[in-house]
Image (cartoon, rainbow, N blue to C red):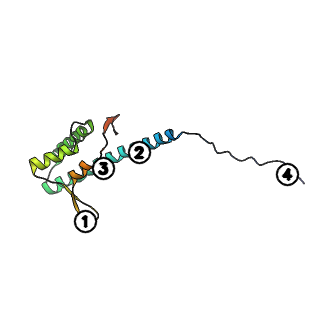
Amino acid sequence: MKYANPLKIEKRERVPTYNMTQAQLDAIREEGFRAGISTGIYYANGMLSAAWLLQLRDTFGFGQRRLQRVFSRVQENFNSIVAGLISYNDMGRVLMDECRIRLTVEKPDGVREDMWEIFRQMELPKLRMEGGKVRL
C-alpha cells in the first residue's frame, strides 16, 4: 500500500500577472469608450434612417426609388457632419429659419425641450471617417 508523500506539494496552476501603468489602463479604457461611441452612432443612424423611411413610405406612399434617394441624401448629410462641413447647430438653424420647424424632445419628467438647445449646450466630440468607420 502506497501512502501520499507528505512532503510533496501540490502544483497549482499559476494565473499570469501583468503590470501596467495607469496611463496604459486609461488608454485602453479610452479606446473602448471610443469604439462604443462609434458603434452606437452607426446603430442610431441606422435606426433613425429606418424609422424615417418607414414613415415616408406609410404616410406619403414613397416607393423604392424615392426612398433610396432620400436615404442617399441622409447619408450625404451624415458624412458632411463627420467631415466637419456642417454641424448640428447649423442644421437646426436652417430648419428654424427657413422651414419654421423647431424640433423638441419630451424628457422623462414630461417637460419638452428644444433639441437644438440641448446640442448647443453639449460638448459634442469631433467625428471623422477612418477605414469605413466613424472615429472620434
Specify the amino acid type for callout 3.
Ala
The quarter in which the C terminus is drawn is top left
Residue extending furthest toward the front: 121
Q: Is residue 78 left or right of residue 10?
A: left
Q: Is residue 25 left or right of residue 64?
A: right
Residue extending furthest toward the bottom: 110
Residue positioned 16% across, 49% down in the render: 63
Describe the element under mark 3 as helix, strand or loop: helix
Q: Residues within 10 Å of mark 4 (few under 14, many from 20)?
A: few
Alpha carbons under labels 2 and 1: distance apart: 30 Å
Q: Mark 2 highlights which residue?
A: 33
Q: If you read the primary sequence from the N terminus, does the residue marked by circle 2 or circle 1 appear first?
A: 2
Image depth: mark 4 or mark 1 in front:
1
Residue 88 in the image: state x and y as whole percent.
22, 45
Specify the amino acid type for callout 4.
Pro
Please tell me whether residue 61 is drawn above or below residue 16 in the rendered image.
below
Q: Mark 4 highlights which residue?
A: 6
Q: Mark 1 highlights which residue?
A: 110
Q: Residues within 10 Å of mark 2 (few under 14, many from 20)?
A: few
Q: If you read the primary sequence from the N terminus, does the residue marked by circle 2 or circle 4 appear first?
A: 4
The quarter in which the N terminus is drawn is bottom right
The dot on residue 44 is 3
Residue positioned 15% across, 50% down in the render: 62
